Image (spheres, rainbow, N blue to C red):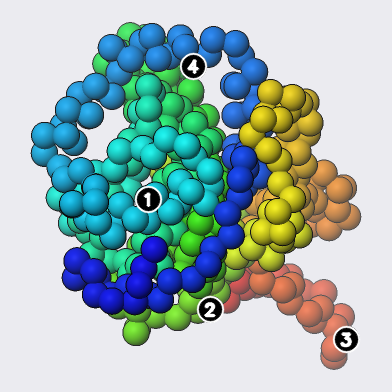
Amino acid sequence: MSDGHQHNGHESVPSRQRRRFPGISSRAYEHPADRSALVALRRLSGFDTVFKALSGLLPERSLRLLFLSDSVRVSDRQFAHLNDMLRDACYILDLEKVPPMYVNQDPVPNAMCIGLDEPIIVVTTGLVELLDEEEMRAVVGHEVGHALSGHSVYRTILLFLTSLAVRVAWIPLGNVAIMAIVTALREWFRKSELSADRAGLLVGQDLQASMRGLMKLAGGNHLHEMNVDAFLEQADEYEAGGDLRDSVLKILNVLPRSHPFATVRAAELKKWAATREYQRIVDGHYPRRDEDKDASVRDSWRESASSYADEVRNSKDPLMKLVSDIAGGAGDLGGRVRRGFGGFTSSAPRPPRDAEGPDTSPGPEDDGPSRDGA
């Protein structure tokens, strides 16, 4: 824990007591879509064993040797402040075995948790130099959350399948089949990142630090030039802005990504921190690890489906509103379709033009989007 002094060039914060969560199951903080996939996979007897048996085909062994030989392993003698954070995070989430952690020379801020036999955590020098102590603590907690959930196994599989897709590109339909699996895994992994953000909050127990860290990942080390509230407003504008064309572009932009966009992650984390679910965890009421074997796959899938349904129902995105309208049989749906893409903009509809009597003469502006609708 920090004592408030300078430590390895990093200004520490005064130590404070943080809640610990003995025996906590990763199900406590996992996003419903992430949790349902993991519960199902854990119930498939021998699933992890099969993939671990294939470890010789995966890049894991090569990566371990690479980090060992060309990175700095965190310990009480190297990057001691990170070692303290790592041990604290494992203590708070009750992860018995502390995973190895490496600092890799790379100006791009990044962190990852990979591995089949045992997870390893890697952070870049760009990230270490970008974040302050409390922001970094949330990131370390994020990666430990990945380790506790077992995400490292499936992330390694994703890396392998992505590589395999390139190798089988010459086989008819081979690449298509692999990329379909990769696309599904990426969708799951984006949700797993939201889960790990929640784990980072449980470890750091400082929502503002988590928000600042995500904001810095988007805008760099210019905290005096940025504002968390304004950053969150960007997430709202991103979700609600534009018309169906923008909705399609959002989907195309996010498909190749393994992580959600930074503003979206910040908004999702703040939303979760305000829930009763989070407060119950803080109060000590959460699923225990020794109950994982009894978790119901059906209940988990039901929660996941409900989560997606709520996401569609409450979304301000034009495409999601269209889906919700179709499901609800909205009366104005036909008219909005006739008006084309502009009929699905998120802006409020224009008032009727009958203030001075009905206007029966058609004009080009009646059938197209308003200039300020996008």
**Quadrant of the frame with the C terminus:** bottom right
For numbered disc 2, what is the local secondary structure?
Answer: helix
Q: Quadrant of residue 64?
A: top left
Q: Position of residue 295 (x, y in %)?
A: 73, 28
Q: Mark 3 belongs to which amino acid?
A: Gly
Q: Mark 1 belongs to which amino acid?
A: Leu
Residue beneath label 1, please?
86
**Is residue 242 or residue 32 the one in the foreground?**
32
For numbered disc 3, what is the local secondary structure?
Answer: loop
Pointers 2 and 4 in contact (C-beta within 8 Å): no
Q: Mark 2 belongs to which amino acid?
A: Asp
- The residue shown at (38%, 23%) is 116
Q: Position of residue 80 (x, y in %)?
A: 25, 56
Is any part of residue 158 visible from this angle?
Answer: no
- The residue shown at (29%, 43%) is 101
Between tags 2 and 4, which lies in front? Answer: 4
Q: Going by the image, does 236 lie left or right of 57? A: right
Residue beneath label 4, please?
48
